[in-house]
Image (spheres, rainbow, N blue to C red):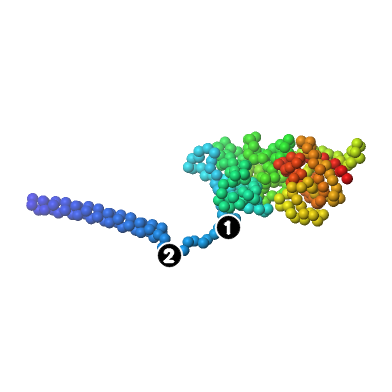
């Protein structure tokens, strides 16, 4: 009986010692871990008193070479990941460009201004209305939202033509996703709006559902004009076609006749009219006219008959639209 009590007493003592030992071991280990973490944090955040301030500088271009993943328009579950992002960068002519990518494939590029590029490089807010960053982010948000729709089918990405404004539209289920213009282009542009539009739509169809590519699209109709008509009332030649304009990138440079180009003046480029010829240009969309003097050669894009200075384009409402059908009246 005495022996049993002794054995039980010894077992209790052993169990107690084991429990105390385990508790002390865990306590000491935790203390060391916390102390180690604190020492590590301190070593990482501590700054020597004699350390010199950093002199590293980030170039304006480098400071905007970053990808921005837009948020969803509607709340997304944690299982959904954005497939579209946007990348700001400098365009060839020094303007801000924002390229929208889907699954890392460049789809379309939105062009802004030189001022926007400088502002973004300096981490400043873009103040210009309808700037390239806002336009790109809005389209990326729509694409991310479509990617969450279980009923979405990439075959429903189509191309329509707005004959009234003579622009191309990329649509999804007959709703406009993006309207193509001179400031919305293919990243590796072909300089042909219809080809750019077709490639954009087919890239979207492939990366968003591996849909078969579209093979062709309807052409934007151009107004029909008689190439040369003699106006009986004045004896002056009247010609028709599409007008465009050029400006900032050429301001101050020599024109084909040797004078300095003034984008705010009332001049124009024509392929064959003699230098000094005065031409009345009438915008057939609004009836507004301006008289210009030919001092340069161009335009060199098929289907266009005259390149107006920025000032002349503003005077007849061509500046905002980029191109317009016009009537040319040769005055001398």
Q: Is residue 134 above or below residue 4?
A: above
Q: Is residue 315 above or below residue 8?
A: above
Is residue 149 visible in the rendered structure shown here?
yes
Q: Is residue 71 above or below residue 2?
A: above
Between 78 and 226, which is closer to the camera in this rendering? 226
Residue depicted at 76% across the width and 40% down the height = 316
Residue that carries the numbered disc 1 in the rendered image? 59
Residue that carries the numbered disc 2 in the rendered image? 50
**Distance Cα–Cα, label 1 vs label 2:** 27 Å
Q: Is 125 on the left-hand or right-hand side of 279?
A: left
Q: Is residue 268 above or below residue 47?
A: above
| Mark 2: secondary structure | loop
Residue depicted at 27% across the width and 54% down the height = 27
Residue depicted at 78% across the width and 43% down the height = 243
Is residue 214 visible in the rendered structure shown here?
no
Q: Position of residue 259 (x, y in %)?
A: 79, 54
């Amino acid at each position: 009986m005495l022996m049993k009590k002794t054995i039980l007493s010894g077992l209790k003592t052993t169990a107690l010692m084991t429990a105390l030992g385990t508790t002390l071991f865990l306590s000491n280990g935790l203390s060391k871990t916390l102390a180690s973490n604190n020492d590590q944090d301190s070593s990482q955040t501590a700054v020597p008193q004699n350390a010199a301030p950093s002199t590293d500088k980030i170039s304006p271009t480098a400071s905007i070479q970053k990808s921005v993943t837009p948020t969803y328009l509607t709340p997304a579950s944690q299982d959904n990941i954005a497939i579209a992002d946007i990348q700001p960068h400098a365009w060839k002519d020094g303007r801000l460009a924002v390229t929208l990518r889907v699954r890392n494939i460049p789809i379309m590029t939105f062009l802004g201004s030189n001022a926007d590029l400088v502002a973004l490089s300096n981490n400043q807010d873009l103040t210009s209305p309808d700037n390239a960053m806002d336009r790109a982010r809005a389209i990326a948000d729509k694409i991310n939202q479509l990617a969450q729709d279980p009923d979405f089918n990439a075959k429903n990405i189509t191309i329509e033509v707005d004959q009234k404004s003579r622009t191309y539209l990329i649509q999804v289920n007959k709703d406009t996703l993006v309207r193509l213009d001179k400031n919305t282009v293919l990243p590796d542009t072909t300089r042909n709006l219809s080809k750019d539009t077709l490639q954009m739509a087919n890239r979207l169809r492939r990366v968003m559902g591996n849909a078969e590519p579209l093979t062709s699209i309807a052409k934007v109709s151009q107004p029909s004009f008689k190439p040369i008509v003699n106006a009986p009332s004045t004896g002056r030649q009247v010609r028709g076609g599409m007008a465009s304009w050029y400006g900032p990138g050429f301001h101050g440079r020599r024109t084909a006749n040797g004078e300095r180009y003034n984008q705010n003046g009332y001049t124009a480029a024509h392929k064959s009219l003699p230098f000094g010829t005065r031409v009345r240009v009438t915008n057939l969309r609004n009836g507004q006219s301006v008289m210009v003097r030919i001092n340069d050669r161009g335009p060199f894009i098929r289907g266009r008959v005259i390149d107006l200075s920025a000032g002349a384009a503003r005077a007849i409402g061509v500046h905002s639209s980029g191109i317009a059908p016009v009537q040319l009246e040769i005055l001398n």
